[in-house]
């Protein structure tokens, strides 16, 4: 009887110790982002109508504590315009993470694009499904870009992905 009680207590306390989060906490993620509309003083371009563009944000988050962290993201961009597709750029996208509670978070990112554009991207995230090993999320990135002899632009996009 003592052996079973001891085994039960060991399993009970080990589950408590494994369920606690220690910091810094490192997570990785992969997503798919579709820009919906891009607006500049020269034009308004709509994805799926004027062309097809897709991005693949891939990164690492390092949470300092349960409220704030750092994220480093690399984003290859692909565009199909009039039947011709190509990689248009590679974006380096570091930023600060802020947990907002109830599965919501905010990422404030700076943007350095290989196409000569730069800027910033506020991103609002929501964890939709969380399991012990992965989380599925949706996000709304709102990129603002400057440079490379183009007018400033604003884009609204939709992203979904998996974090592990």
Image: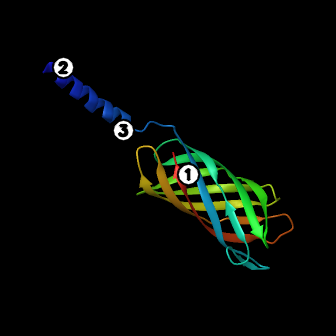
Query: Between disc 3 and disc 1, whose residue precedes?
Result: 3
Q: In the rendered image, is residue 125 in sight?
A: no
Q: CA distance from mark 3 to mark 1?
A: 22 Å
Answer whether labels 1 and 2 touch (C-beta < 8 Å): no
In the rendered view, how is the structure colored?
rainbow
Could you say which is closer to the camera, residue 82 or residue 50? 82
For this orientation, the residue located farthest to the front is: 83
- Label 1 environment density (alpha carbons within 10 Å; few <14, some 14–19, many ≥20): many
Residue 36, image x, y percentages: 64, 72
Q: In what quadrant of the picture does the N terminus appear? A: top left
Q: Label 2: which residue?
A: 3
Quadrant in the rendering for residue 14 = top left
For this orientation, the residue located farthest to the left is: 1
Q: Label 1: which residue?
A: 97
Which is closer to the viewer, label 1 or label 2?
2
Q: CA distance from mark 1 to mark 2?
A: 47 Å
User: Callout 3: helix, strand or loop?
Assistant: helix
């Amino acid at each position: 009887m003592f052996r079973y009680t001891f085994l039960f207590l060991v399993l009970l306390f080990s589950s408590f110790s494994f369920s606690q989060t220690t910091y810094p906490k490192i997570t990785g993620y992969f997503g798919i982002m579709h820009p919906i509309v891009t607006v500049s003083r020269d034009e308004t371009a709509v994805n799926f109508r004027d062309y097809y563009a897709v991005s693949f944000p891939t990164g690492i988050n390092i949470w300092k504590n349960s409220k704030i962290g750092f994220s480093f993201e690399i984003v290859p961009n692909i565009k199909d315009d009039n039947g011709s597709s190509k990689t248009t750029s590679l974006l380096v996208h570091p930023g600060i993470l802020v947990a907002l509670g109830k599965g919501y978070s905010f990422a404030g990112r700076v943007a350095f694009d290989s196409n000569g554009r730069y800027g910033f991207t506020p991103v609002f995230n929501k964890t939709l499904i969380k399991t012990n090993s992965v989380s599925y999320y949706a996000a709304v990135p709102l990129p603002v870009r400057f440079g490379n002899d183009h007018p400033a632009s604003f884009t609204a996009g939709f992203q979904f992905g998996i974090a592990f």
